[in-house]
Amino acid sequence: MSHKHFKGQFEVELKYRLACRVAFLAVLNSIEYEVMFEDNIESDCYFDTPTQQLLAQHKSVCIRECEPSGIKLWIVKGPDADRCQASNITDAKSAKSMLETMGYQVCLQMTKQRSIYFVGKFHITLDHLAGLGDFAEFAIMTDDEDSLEIYRAELVDLAAQFGLTQDQLEHRSYRSMQEAK
């Protein structure tokens, strides 16, 4: 298992709504890949100010707890679409308390089932969210801002190997889809 896939301040990510999870897994099983974990349960706790200032600035702050892997992350996204940083933490309860002490409040909590696979330099997440469906995210994290568009094109090509098309792209975040539900 390699965590080098999650290093960098930028993330190029393409999210696709899956018509058939079984068909997706059949393609995955026909290519070379490495498993980070399968069927992890991720609980995300999003924070914002009472007036939703972060949302208005296209930013998000999330504390994520994963089981059974035991991974705990502090994740900040935005304001640019490709800007994303995550840091491992050991005490999610304290991190949440610190955010609340700074005036942030919980604005959304959600849970998803996630599997993460490495295909070359890319990582693919296979997600299920109750009430929203199944999704696959094709992504890479990097510090090389000049390569973002090159990576985006390579990710489109990789997704096409799975039969995924532009029509299946989901541009909304899970947070915005959950809030719209």
Image: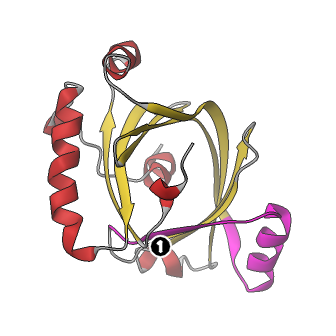
Number of numbered discs present?
A: 1
Q: Is residue 83 magenta?
A: yes
The magenta region covers: 82-106
Q: Residue at the bottom extreme? A: 102
Image side of residue 54 versus residue 26, left or right: right
Q: What residue is pinned by disc 1? A: 55
Q: Is residue 152 visible?
A: yes
Taking the image as drawn, is residue 133 in sight? no
Q: Quadrant of the N terminus?
A: top right
Residue type indicated by callout 1: Leu
Residue 7, position in %: x, y?
A: 48, 65
> Nearest the camera: 48 or 9?
9
Q: List x then y, in percent, for residue 162.
A: 24, 26
Callout 1 secondary element: helix
Rendered residue at 31%/23% (across/down): 31
Residue 55 position (above or below residue 152): below
Whether residue 103 appears in magenta in the rendering, the answer is yes
